[in-house]
Image: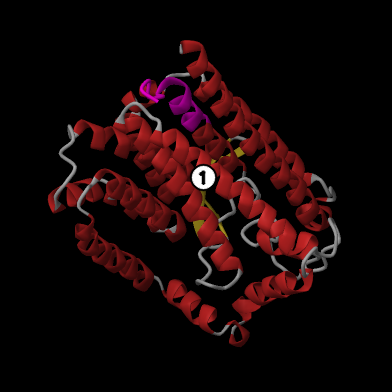
Amino acid sequence: MAQKRATDLSKTDRTMLVLVVLLAAFGLAVLFSTSEYNGRVRFGDSAYYFKKQLFATALGMGAMYMVSSVDYHFFLKLAPVAYLLSMVLSTAVLLFGQEINGSKRWLNLGPLSFQPSEFAKVAVILFLAWQIERSQKRTEGFWFMCRTMLTLLPIVGLVGSNNLSTAIIILGIGVILIFSSNPKYMQFIGLGSTGIGFVAIFLAAESYRLERLAIWRNPEKYEKGFQTIQGLYAIGSGGIFGRGFGSSLQKLGFVPEAQNDMIFSIICEELGVAGAVFLILLFALLLWRLGVIAMHAKDLAGALICGGIMGHLAIQVILNIAVVTNTIPNTGITLPFVSYGGTSEVFLLGEMGLAMSVGRYGRNSNR
């Protein structure tokens, strides 16, 4: 029996690992193609962005391996410290952060830059799992939901002051974890209304956020709608099987910063609907795997950690694709494992290692 469980566990780890490696490899290949033009024009090196992302991916893979080898309960004990550290780093960004395109989101650490908001996502997942588990199963009632969400407001306020998209993701993670641990679903109507009001306040606080709503409704009327329009051109011109890998025209300066938020449009142009469906299928399988690990976790904390990681990944993928297809206003959300961004890649792979740790050390012995 013990041998059977060990074999099952080994398969679980392999399934998760294969999906993560496939997504990372697919992302690197697409990024190289998408960023080639910008790298050559800006830095005289067509592989500039690819090499930096490759370094981040290798670093992230190492982090994933190390995290997966440690019992997740160790990281759970550090959750309060991690949450406090995320608030300190987010405050440091407001005071000393590097401003790019009008937003302060990066801290310079020598030759490297670091986005504390990416660390904040992981810290919030661990902190909420720690907090909810310590409630000793008293996870029902409107007061439980309010108390839990109130603990998130400091980090949401700090991050949301210059990065609304990440603040929305953090709020989404909180709602998902509370929903997963609370058996009374009708109370979420009140919580949802409060969340909508909170987001509305953030939207109204800055004029440029209201401008994004106007651009979303009619991008042809605004100069800043150029990126959206060109992204839709790229999607439409790809057809079923695309123009061919490396053959995109819109990446040649027509889609600004194509290697970042809008990279899904270039995927559609070069690989067509088939390539887009393949990528979405990989994401869906990874989400399914995370769900399986959560269902087989031996304790509430392990299930919540996997649920939080699953929620983070799902929210970010859905919002990015929705932005690129102009289904929702532009929010500046990257596509996990695919868009350029070293900090995001490292911490996302670290989250995958955390999920693998739950699968390895937290598997329910009754299953």
- At a point 43% along the width and 76% down the height, the residue shown is 210
Q: On the rendered structure, is 31 left or right of 59?
A: right
Please, which residue is most extreme toward the top here?
2
| Number of on-image labels | 1
What x and y, as percent, mark residue 224? Answer: 60, 76
- At a point 25% along the width and 67% down the height, the residue shown is 193
Is there any visible trace of residue 96 in the rendered image?
Answer: no
| Residue designated by label 1 | 287
What x and y, as percent, mark residue 309? Answer: 45, 41
Q: Which residues are magenta?
A: 353-367
Q: On the rendered structure, is 12 left or right of 308?
A: right
Choose top left, top right, bottom left or bottom right for residue 17: top right
Q: Main secondary structure of the magenta part?
A: helix
Of residues 314 and 45, the one nearer the viewer is 314
Choose top left, top right, bottom left or bottom right for residue 20: top right
Is residue 78 covered in magenta? no
